[in-house]
Image: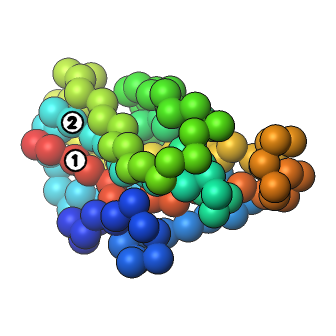
Amino acid sequence: LIDGIRGATNFRLGGWQGYQDTDFEAIVDLGSFKNLSLVGAGFLQDARSWIWMPIYVEFSVSADGINFTTVGKILNKVPEEDENPQVQTLVLKSDKFIAPATGVRFIKVFAKNLGTIPAWHPGAGEPAYIFIDEILADY
């Protein structure tokens, strides 16, 4: 998730981490304090393969890895009915990433899974997947 390798629209080529029947959450330790200008994450939708974009992604930052401040939430704009495989990078730019006096050391990414596959889909009633390829930060 932090190796710089991005996934393709064909998930079978690799580069993705998939999670079924659960939301995605990860905390990244930047190793030292940074003044961030951007956070983001890349996701895949391939509805024919039971993979959907997250409903939303929420980014939080912390100086100590325990106390996090939410800095933004991005709603997915890809319709769940869209069956065309596609990659979307959800990015948040803000001046809120600077923790008082220290900077940011930890980034938390939370992505809300679609949940149950919708009734119109052949997999209706089964748990959906969420695929993520990379967590991004710029400082």
Task: Residue 27: give x, y in percent of width and height.
Answer: 43, 56
The quadrant where residue 103 appears: top left
Image quarter of residue 9: bottom left
Residue under the image location 55 percent in, 67 percent down: 18
- Residue 98 position, x and y percent, is 21, 30
The amino acid pointed to by label 2 is: Leu
The residue at the far bottom in this view is: 13
**Of 9 and 63, the residue lying toward us:** 9
Q: How dense is the environment of label 1, judged by Cα within 10 Å: few (below 14), some, or many (20 and up)?
A: some
Q: Is mark 2 on a helix, strand or loop?
A: strand
User: Can residue 102 be seen in this snapshot?
Assistant: no
Q: Residue at x 14, y 37 (%)?
A: 35
Give the SS element for disc 1. strand
Which of 89/99 is in front? 89
Three-letter amino acid code at the position of disc 1: Ala
Residue 72 position within the rendered picture, expressed as x and y whole percent measured from the top left? 41, 26
Residue 56 found in image quarter: top right
Left or right: residue 38 versus residue 70 is left
In the rendered image, the residue lying farthest to the top is: 95
Q: How far apart are marks 2 and 1 (CA)?
A: 5 Å
Residue indicated by mark 1? 137
Does the residue at mark 2 contact the one at mark 1 (Cβ under 8 Å)? yes
In this image, 93 relative to 131: left or right? left
Front residue (pair 9, 106): 9
* Picture coordinates of residue 113, whole percent (x, y): 65, 47
Q: Mark 2 points at which residue?
A: 38
Q: Quadrant of the N terminus?
A: bottom left
Q: Residue at x 23, y 23 (%)?
A: 94
Q: How is the model colour-coded? A: rainbow
Q: Earlier in the sequence, mark 2 or mark 1?
A: 2
